[in-house]
Image: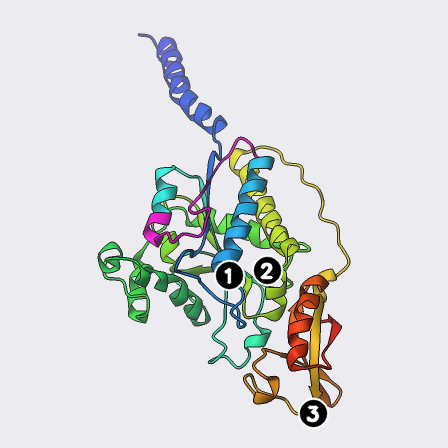
Amino acid sequence: MDGMNTRKLLVLVLSCLCLPLFSQEAALKLRTVVIDPGHGGHDAGCVSRDRQTKEKDLVLDIGKRLAEKIRRECPDVKVIMTRSDDRFIELYDRAKIANKANANLFISIHVDAVDTRRNPNWRTVNGYTVYTMGESKNNANMETIKRENSVILLEDDYTTKYQGFDPNDTESYIFFSLMQNANQEQSVHFGEIVSREMGKNGPFRHSKGIRQAPFLVLWRTAMPSVLVECGYITSEGDLAVLRAEEGRDKIAARLCRGFRIYKAEYEGTKLELEEIKPEADTAAVRYGIQIMASGKRLREGDPALKGLSAQAVPSGVLYKYIVSVSTELSTTRADLPSVKKKFPDAFLVKMDF
């Protein structure tokens, strides 16, 4: 075979080898997403200080809203939920559901909390955080990490499933530093998109950024995965957002927007989104019931509060004590009769903070 024919044959062979590659690239699709509402069943997750609101209920509602929005706005995507009702799903099985479905993305939804007994500044801790799998470089995250991972203590034979891992033993987390996550780069990229979109006139004022942490629910997933802590149930402002239907819907809308942006980038397609227009800062408006005013700063549990959990709001030389804080006036107004039984002079107030 002469040189000319040899070159022609080589070009033909290379062309045939390249065809499947270009075909696969063109056909790249984000076909399946798994939404994982945390906790459930006998695992309530974090609970509000008045014991009226549970994390498991909040994240299930947000997860359902997110699933509905993705199905409506991205009908070509299969949406799977690890749980769609109040049931307990083991962490091991949550990842298993995603892997079995060959999912392209895994989104775990949670609500954070602060240990109010140990952290004297717990009232000021608020905002959302996006986590990806990795070794935590921030000791401040350890409280959240241990709490989320301690769910395995409710599972049968957890020592075998998780290779002897003890969620309460700091040394157990050392092995995570040896782990490599092939999807880490894409996980971080999706997390950055979500964090950015949540901050655009979102339901929470404060972003705590993108962080890496050894969450067991992300450990065994074989696709890009994130865990989103949607506010603090111990923050009166965040809790008011989470208790309001509008607040939960806005969280789901921001997550869906982030998903659509990531999907378009994943598939190499063009996406046109409506610009998020600035709104009046209604997120800062809260309603509450003032029960008393005092020149003394009362501690939580003080007998003068008669068993109510009150927020102390400085006003000159006085502190105003306010309960039943909410973004919805109707919710606060409904609590007024029961509060008046303990404080007959209590009245509704509008709070701007």
Alpha carbons under labels 2 and 1: distance apart: 9 Å
Q: Is residue 277 above or below residue 80?
A: below
Indicate the position of residue 133 as horizontal and vertical percent values. Answer: 41, 55
Colour approach in the figure: rainbow
Residue behind mark 1: 111
Q: Name the disc covering residue 242, or none.
A: 2
Dots 2, 1 in contact, CB < 8 A: yes
Residue behind mark 3: 295
Tell me the quarter of the image containing the N terminus: top left
Please indicate, yes or no, whether residue 322 appears anywhere in the rendered image.
no
Q: Is residue 90 left or right of residue 188?
A: left
Q: Nearer the viewer, residue 21 or 181?
A: 181
- Residue 84 magenta-drawn? yes
Alpha carbons under labels 3 and 2: distance apart: 32 Å
Q: Nearer the viewer, mark 3 or mark 1?
A: 3
Q: Is residue 325 above or below residue 57?
A: below
Compare marks 3 and 1 and give the one earlier in the sequence.
Answer: 1
**Callout 2 amino acid:** Leu
Alpha carbons under labels 3 and 1: distance apart: 35 Å
Q: Residues within 10 Å of mark 1 (few under 14, many from 20)?
A: many
